Image (cartoon, rainbow, N blue to C red):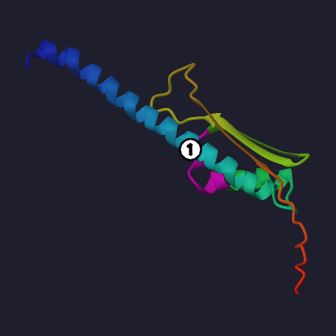
Amino acid sequence: MTTTELVLVFPTLLALVWTVVQFGLWFYDGSVAHAAAAEGVRAARTEGGTAAAGQQRAEAFLASAGGRGLDHVVVSASRTGDRARVEVTGDATTIVPIPGLRLRVRGVAESPLEQLAPLARRSTP
């Protein structure tokens, strides 16, 4: 391989590797955001749960599960009518800080509220 070929091939190969690694980080951060939203909605949907409890649980999950890679994280939770919803948004980790490059990730989980109903009595013959 000549020097000219190396000068042309090496930067292309390096950019390809960088792109693959960056995609992996973006995918991982998106998975963490989705998991945090799911964990938050589990707390918010319980019979005694609140939207604040769901938000706190999602934030605690992010702190413990590697959400430190996310920047500008916003966790919002709501509990209305018969549904609970938690949304986690942020910016994914970037390998090389490029001005203007923001790789947004978003995780949303929504679920019906748990409602305990009394057991029906069986009549025995």
Mark 1, Cα crowd under 10 Å, few <14 / some 14-19 / many 20+, is: some
Name the image quarter holding the C terminus: bottom right
Residue at the farthest bottom position: 125
The magenta stretch spans residue 67: yes
Residue at 50% x, 32% y: name it. 94
Horizontal and vertical percent position of residue 21: 40, 35
Residue at 69% x, 54% y: name it. 39
Q: Write the start and end of the magenta stretch as one range.
A: 61-70
Lateral position of residue 47 relative to residue 15, left or right: right
The relative height of residue 23 versus residue 78 in the rendered view (above or below) is above
Residue at 76% x, 49% y: name it. 111
Name the image quarter holding the N terminus: top left
**Any part of residue 114 in sight:** yes
Q: Quadrant of residue 88?
A: top right
Amino acid type indicated by mark 1: Ser
The relative height of residue 67 versus residue 46 in the rendered view (above or below) is above
